[in-house]
Image (spheres, grey):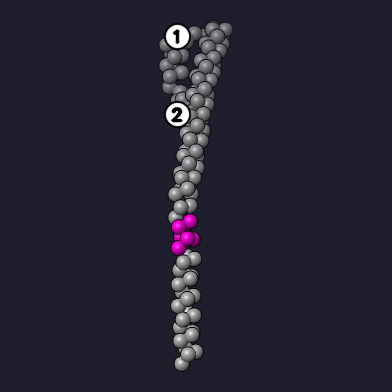
């Protein structure tokens, strides 16, 4: 009979000591969790910031390209007008501007 009591006591001691060891581990995990979530939040904020900067840069590039396209179209129409004058045919400026406005621009 003493052997089963000894096993029960040993089992109880193991259970109690294991619970005392687990509590500090859970405490450390709980303390580390807010730090990890703050780090994750900081990382996601940085990623969003970088994405916004990339988008703004692309919008600026698109605007520059639109300006270049507009300038090239105007130059093309001017060349066409000069060519028509050289060939003896003339096109009113309003027709050239109308043609220029009909051509679509790149959208943002």
Q: Please give the label number shown on residue 58.
A: none
Main SS type for the magenta part?
helix
Query: Which residue is rendered at x = 46% and y = 14% of the image?
Result: 96
Q: Position of residue 20 (x, y in %)?
A: 46, 66
Tell me the residue that label 1 is attached to. Answer: 92
| Label tally | 2
Q: Quadrant of residue 8?
A: bottom left
Quarter holding the C terminus is: top left
Mark 2 vs mark 1, CA separation in Å: 29 Å
Query: Which residue is rendered at x = 44% and y = 55% of the image?
Result: 30
* Foreground disc of the pair 2, 1: 2
Circle 2 Cα neighbour tier, 10 Å, few/some/many (<14 / 14–19 / ≥20): few
Tell me the residue that label 2 is attached to. Answer: 107
- Could you say whether the residue bearing mark 1 is in a helix, strand or loop? loop
Q: Position of residue 88 (x, y in %)?
A: 54, 7
Magenta segment boundaries in residue numbering: 23-29
**Proximity of marks 2 and 1: CB atoms separated by less than 8 Å:** no
Name the outermost residue toward the front: 2
């Amino acid at each position: 009979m003493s052997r089963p009591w000894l096993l029960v006591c040993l089992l109880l001691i193991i259970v109690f000591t294991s619970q005392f060891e687990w509590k500090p581990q859970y405490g450390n995990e709980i303390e580390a969790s807010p730090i990890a979530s703050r780090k994750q939040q900081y990382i996601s904020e940085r990623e969003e910031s970088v994405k916004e900067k990339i988008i703004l840069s692309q919008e600026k590039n698109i605007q520059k390209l639109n300006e270049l396209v507009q300038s090239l179209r105007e130059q093309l129409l001017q060349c066409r007008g000069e060519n028509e004058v050289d060939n003896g045919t003339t096109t009113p400026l309003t027709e050239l501007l109308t043609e220029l406005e009909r051509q679509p621009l790149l959208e943002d």
